[in-house]
Image (cartoon, rainbow, N blue to C red):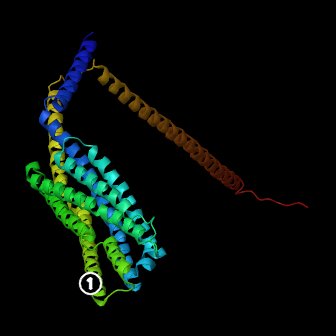
């Protein structure tokens, strides 16, 4: 009865400590829970930041390919001596336009992915701002897809048709510039509000630098279609060839000057893209998340220390229990196992002793028999010698006559 009572008390005590451990970690430790939730949120945000800016690297690479195609058709325009019809209907020019559209479409898919990533977390203001920026750039790209569509042909004779085609392209430039203005506004808005968000220094500096790169890139891309865009140049050529069969020296110089300016601008965009990608790669691969890692290490130490304290308290309570008695079921089981092992050892020792005794007895018997055989042989020889001596003594004074 006492054994059952003791065991029930132990079970109750263990259940109490399980409950204590649960409340220690789940209820009373609210501060730790909040920190862990915040840390988990930070992990998700860091993953999203790395995803969207990895996308941005790919976007810049595709943009660089588009810029290469711009350089190509400006060079082609010079090689064709600014001949409107030969250049505008050139297969290579159409291929360059198609390549630009292709890379813009790829970038829009990447922007879609970034928009979905950023939208997966709610109520984080700077992520909402980034999402709005990506949406604005995507909308601008949709206009560029129509703008660079190669599905047109200029006629050698129908100048009115040519004019309508080129004016339709040029009319889109104003809308595109409005979109670039909207992108600039959203970037500046994020830059102005960034201090309010109280981000960690590394992330804050990274987004700030990203804004600067995007502002410069947005400005340069807008300049590509301002004043002397490719379709503006074609419209100028159209007006010249409509009134004259050849270019004047002055017109040729002005066009060459405009193309040179555009090629310098394209080169500057390529350099900007390269610098931004190098900076972004360095940040997402080496610097972003370092501060968060330090926080994780601190939280791990805090958690480990807390668990150690709980374990220490549990052990202290365990020490206050009564020492195990013979009546305790656990102790009885231990005693049974101990006795069983000892009995097995004793049986082994007894068997070994019996084996040794048996082997020793057999050996002694063999030795005894050998001794008896040896001594019996010696005794027989001695007896024969005695008999001979006796005969010799008895017959010592007798004379033996051999009668033959």
Which residue does the image show at 61% across and 44% down from the upper left? 369
Seen as rendered, the residue at the extreme right is 404
Seen as rendered, the residue at the extreme bottom is 249
Image check: 402 left or right of 276? Answer: right
Measuring from the top left, give residue 376's x and y in whole percent: 64, 47
Write down the residue under mark 1: 254
Residue at disc 1, secondary structure:
helix
Which residue does the image show at 47% across and 37% down from the upper left? 353
Measuring from the top left, give residue 100's x and y in whole percent: 39, 67
Total numbered labels placed on residues in the image: 1
The quadrant holding residue 165 is bottom left
Depth check: give the residue in front, 374 or 335: 335
Image check: 386 left or right of 223? Answer: right
Q: In which quarter of the image is the N terminus?
A: top left
Measuring from the top left, give residue 20's x and y in whole percent: 17, 26
Seen as rendered, the residue at the extreme left is 196
Q: Residues within 10 Å of mark 1 (few under 14, many from 20)?
A: few
Measuring from the top left, give residue 344's x and y in whole percent: 44, 32
The quadrant holding residue 226 is bottom left
Image check: 280 left or right of 199? Answer: right
Depth check: give the residue in front, 236 or 288: 236
Depth check: give the residue in front, 265 or 211: 265
Rendered position, 270 above or below 59 = below
Q: In which quarter of the image is the C terminus?
A: bottom right
Seen as rendered, the residue at the extreme front is 243
């Amino acid at each position: 009865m006492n054994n059952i009572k003791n065991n029930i008390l132990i079970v109750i005590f263990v259940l109490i400590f399980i409950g204590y451990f649960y409340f220690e970690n789940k209820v009373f430790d609210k501060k730790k829970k909040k920190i862990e939730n915040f840390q988990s949120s930070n992990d998700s945000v860091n993953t999203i930041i790395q995803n969207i800016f990895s996308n941005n690297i790919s976007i810049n690479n595709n943009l660089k390919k588009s810029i290469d195609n711009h350089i190509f058709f400006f060079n082609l325009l010079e090689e064709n001596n600014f001949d409107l019809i030969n250049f505008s209907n050139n297969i290579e020019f159409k291929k360059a336009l198609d390549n630009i559209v292709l890379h813009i479409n790829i970038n829009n898919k990447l922007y879609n992915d970034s928009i979905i990533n950023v939208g997966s977390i709610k109520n984080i203001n700077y992520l909402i701002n980034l999402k709005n920026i990506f949406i604005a750039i995507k909308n601008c790209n949709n206009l560029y897809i129509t703008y660079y569509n190669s599905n047109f042909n200029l006629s050698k004779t129908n100048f009115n048709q040519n004019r309508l085609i080129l004016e339709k392209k040029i009319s889109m430039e104003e809308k595109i510039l409005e979109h670039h203005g909207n992108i600039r506004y959203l970037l500046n808005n994020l830059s102005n509000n960034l201090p309010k968000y109280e981000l960690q220094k590394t992330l804050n500096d990274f987004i700030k630098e990203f804004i600067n790169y995007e502002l410069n890139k947005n400005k340069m891309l807008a300049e590509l279609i301002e004043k002397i865009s490719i379709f503006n140049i074609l419209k100028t050529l159209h007006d010249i060839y409509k009134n004259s069969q050849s270019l004047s020296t002055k017109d040729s110089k002005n066009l060459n000057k405009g193309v040179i300016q555009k090629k310098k601008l394209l080169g500057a965009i390529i350099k900007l893209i390269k610098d931004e990608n190098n900076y972004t790669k360095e940040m997402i691969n080496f610097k972003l998340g370092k501060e968060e890692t330090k926080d994780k290490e601190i939280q791990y130490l805090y958690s480990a220390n807390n668990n150690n304290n709980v374990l220490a308290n549990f052990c202290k309570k365990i020490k206050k229990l009564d020492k195990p008695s013979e009546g305790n079921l656990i102790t009885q089981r231990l005693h049974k196992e101990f006795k069983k092992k000892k009995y097995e050892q004793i049986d082994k020792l007894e068997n070994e002793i019996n084996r040794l005794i048996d082997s020793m007895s057999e050996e002694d018997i063999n030795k005894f028999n050998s001794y008896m055989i040896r001594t019996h042989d010696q005794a027989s020889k001695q007896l024969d010698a005695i008999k001979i001596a006796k005969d010799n003594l008895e017959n010592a004074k007798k004379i033996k006559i051999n009668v033959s």
